[in-house]
Amino acid sequence: MAHNSLSFKKKQHFLQLTKDIPADRILFCPVDISKHFHVALFHDIRSQPLSDFFEFSASKIGFASFTARLEQAFSLHAPKLVLIGMEPTSVYYEGLLHNLRHKYAASTTPKLQLCIIDPAAVKENRRQHSLRTQKTDQIDAAAIGELLTRGLYTPAHFSAPQAISIKEIARSLNDHRQQMLALWNRLLTRLDRVFPNLLINYQTEKPFAQQPLENKLLDHLLHLCPDPYLILDLTTADLIDLFHRQDRPLGPKRAEKIVQAAHRALLLPKAYHAVHLQLFNRELETLDFLKAQIARLEQQLEQLITQSPARHLLAIAGNSAKLTAELIAALEDWQRYDTIQTISRRGRISSHRGAIRQFEHKTKDFQTRFGLSQKCHIQNDL
């Protein structure tokens, strides 16, 4: 029976890496990452320590101190293979990981394997080997090291700068959209004080707009004349003229609809209303700013996608630059996936036969450019 579990694949990689190397010529260096400093030690394949725990700063000074200790261990133990492992702790591991890669990129003696450890695995290992209430940097470093000796790590993957840009812009877009939704909900609450009953839905009283986020007339009204006190002082012709001066369309029928909404509003006294109107206008400016930022990020993202190997995915029916970017952000390391089905599940692409076949057809060149295995194919039973 074929073994497809992630743990099995990790161990298989580890056995392949170490098969021709004597156990006493393999050096392990687990590092517990934190914001300001890191904790590390050296040990052998039996988890027997070859040094005490030591700390080093997360700065360039600390990096120099760590590499000096590392090279001293090279001289002392003459390893053929060195595995340096760490958890992907927030963003704080990235500087160490990239600089180690840059410094030892050409090193063949010893060979360096930079490893990423699953934080959930570290937590479980710590729970099995120490009291549940105990958690120290030293205990975490030891847990990372024990997982390294069992091959339970993922080789560090270094994405291309273009892929990082796509991923980070996609994340920024999601953050901006969440902020905009939260602000829009707050704005609707403010609107109930500024223009009460505008969206009322009771018996014969119908809302001004069924879908407030998508209604153009409501958007024009909120930007040009959100004050019902002012609307009550205007005639229908005056209101139409106000819209037309700002190049916003408005006919007599819709103008009458706005006036009727102002007449049915149960308004706060003018002094209180003025306070909320001022706050409403400020929040509306912030909402407009977020919309402009989202539009700019979407444009940047589309340009990046069309310049990347992933541009072929845009031809899939129902796909978009946003969905393609989210796929890239979710997968990142394409070498981890050996079938189209695995990618579709991880990227939340429809498993419908037609969609999968489109995905396969459109990604032939994509697979080659990203280094996907030739095993990527569609199963006959789908």
Image: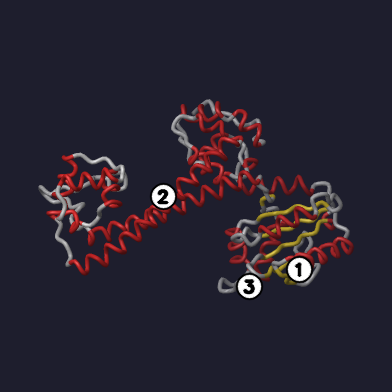
Q: Name the image quarter holding the N terminus.
A: top right
> To which residue does mark 2 refer?
291
Question: Of the residues tagged 3 and 1, which is closer to the observer?
Answer: 1
Question: Of the residues tagged 1 and 2, which is closer to the observer?
Answer: 2
> To which residue does mark 3 refer?
136
Residues 255 and 311: in front is 255
Identify which residue is drawn at 62% across, 33% down. Answer: 367
Check whether the beta carbons of the residues at disc 1 and disc 2 lie within 8 A of each other. no
Q: Position of residue 375 (x, y in %)?
A: 63, 31
Q: Earlier in the sequence, mark 2 or mark 3?
A: 3
Q: Earlier in the sequence, mark 3 or mark 1?
A: 1
Real-space CA distance between mark 2 and mark 3, rounded to the nearest whole angstrom? 45 Å
Instruction: Give the label on residue 61, or none.
Output: 1
Does residue 233 lie above or below 138 as drawn?
A: above
Which kind of residue does numbered mark 3 sit on?
Thr
Residues 304 and 201: in front is 304
Identify which residue is drawn at 65% across, 41% down. Answer: 335
Q: Earlier in the sequence, mark 1 or mark 2?
A: 1
Q: Residues within 10 Å of mark 1 (few under 14, many from 20)?
A: few
